[in-house]
Amino acid sequence: MQLFWDKKVETMKPSELAALQLKRLKKTVHAVQQVEFYRKQFSDAGISASVIKSLDDIQKLPFTKKQDLRDGYPFGFFAVPMRDIVRVHTTSGTTGKPTVVGYTRRDLDTWANLIARNMTMIGIGKDDIFQNMVNYGMFTGGLGFHYGAELIGMTVIPSATGNTRRQIEMIRDFGVTAIHCTPSYAMHLSEVAEEMGESLDSLKTGIFGAEPWSDTMRKTLENRLGVTAFDSYGLSELFGPGVAFECPERDGLHIWHDSYLVEIIDPATGERLPDGEQGELVVTPLVKEAMPLIRYRTGDVTMLMENGCLCGRGKKIARISGRSDDMLIIRGINVFPSQIEHVLLRIPEVGNQFMVYIDRINHLDEMTVEVEINRSYFSGELADLAKIQKKVVKELHDTLELRTTVKLMEPGSLPRFEGKAKRVIDRRGDI
Ligand SMILES: [Zn+2]
């Protein structure tokens, strides 16, 4: 396969970029007319594909929601005949029916190219040995990164998930220089490596994604694994990983504007928000064939950053701060699990593993945070424990403005996650 992106695309003048986006948007709006859902949506709204005269006209089109895709199970959103579909993936997690995503041959090439662009941007390539420690099944993280890494000539080790000691042996024996996994698994990997007395000296680059993670977590992972850590963002509905990626500046993520049209909206009203304001990320992919989508609501919370990047690749999105539907409302206060993680990582007396339980007791929401105590502070003295517990309660309160119950747990007693972490258990039932 040939690389078909061009460095010029990444540093296009705004007017050239806008012209390319408009051309591709018009093509996409015509392509979705093959999908019954969109034909109906357009006719209900009294509009036709020719409504798009400028990029701003996209605001005349309705959103596509996750539930719409579920309702179209299995192949309702495919815009090409099945004989042109060469692969399907399904979305991970969540209950109920999965969302099915289809790819044409050209889609797979485009996707591999997007990943290759991202990896090239952070300076890895032919000389790197890359261990891809994510699920290779229906989840897009495995095969997505696999083909992108092969495209730029990296030596790819498709180790997938599981058997952490074996993963560590491979890193050591094969001289692995770059890894890809979830940040939670990276943390687990570093703990097991420490137990095994392995220093993983060959590692240089860590690509972490599939769940939101904080800058504090970045520092911890960089110290423990000896890597430079990069944030990777994507979702299966938009091919998979590779939608946005940090450049070496590591201050926000580049999203390829020639391939994705980005809007930030107020999740409650659907109104578009200006640059610099946090809201829900809405994306219209401009280069998808098998499953083109219009104004897809990702559910992820971020903003378009006001300033461009020193590297010249254009407007970035901020790191994802949570999911608009992951957001917990506790006693009327919005809480993102990433905020809790951020607080805990700042406190040296506790470890990196935690669980959050939400209950409703006497009509009041109660949040309980279980966190492991740090081994080196585990003296067994009750007075010490009480002091640490008080500190965690106070720090959580300072950030969340919410009283929580904190339970200190023995090191190693909380669950470890290899895929997406499920750290929040909401036991309130229907509200
Ligand atoms: Zn940059």
Image (cartoon, rainbow, N blue to C red):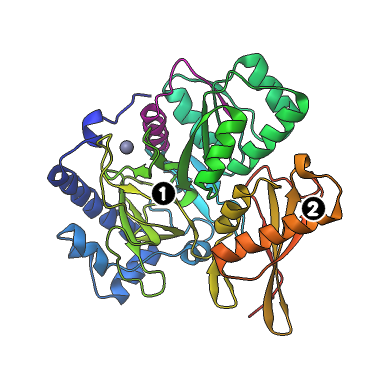
Q: Residue placed farthest to the front in the image?
A: 383
Q: Left or right: where does residue 56 sit relative to residue 269?
A: left
Q: Is residue 122 magenta?
A: yes
Q: Is residue 128 magenta?
A: yes
Q: Left or right: where does residue 184 sit relative to residue 89?
A: right
> Which residue position holds label 1?
81
> Splitting the image into four quadrants, where does ligand 1 fall?
top left
The quadrant of the rendering that contains the C terminus is: bottom right
- Pair 2/1: label in front: 2
Q: Earlier in the sequence, mark 2 or mark 1?
A: 1
The quadrant of the rendering that contains the N terminus is: top left
Which percent across, then down, holds residue 171? 64, 21
Q: Sort mark 2 into few (<14), some (14-19) or many (20+) by Cα contacts within 10 Å.
A: few
Task: Kindly tell me whether mark 2's CB lies below 8 Å from ligand 1.
Answer: no
Q: Secondary structure at mark 2?
A: helix
Question: For this rendering, which residue is in front, 331 or 175?
Answer: 331
Q: Sort mark 1 into few (<14), some (14-19) or many (20+) by Cα contacts within 10 Å.
A: few
Three-letter residue code for mark 1: Pro
Q: Quadrant of residue 422?
A: bottom right
Q: Residue at x 71, y 61 (%)?
A: 390
Which residue range is magenta in the image? 108-132
Q: How many marks?
A: 2
Q: Residue at x 61, y 37 (%)?
A: 134
Examine the rendering and report whether any part of residue 189 can be seen.
Answer: yes
Which percent across, then down, holds residue 115? 42, 34
- Relative height, residue 182 to residue 119 (above, below): below
- Relative height, residue 7 to residue 27 (above, below): above
> Which residue position holds label 2?
384
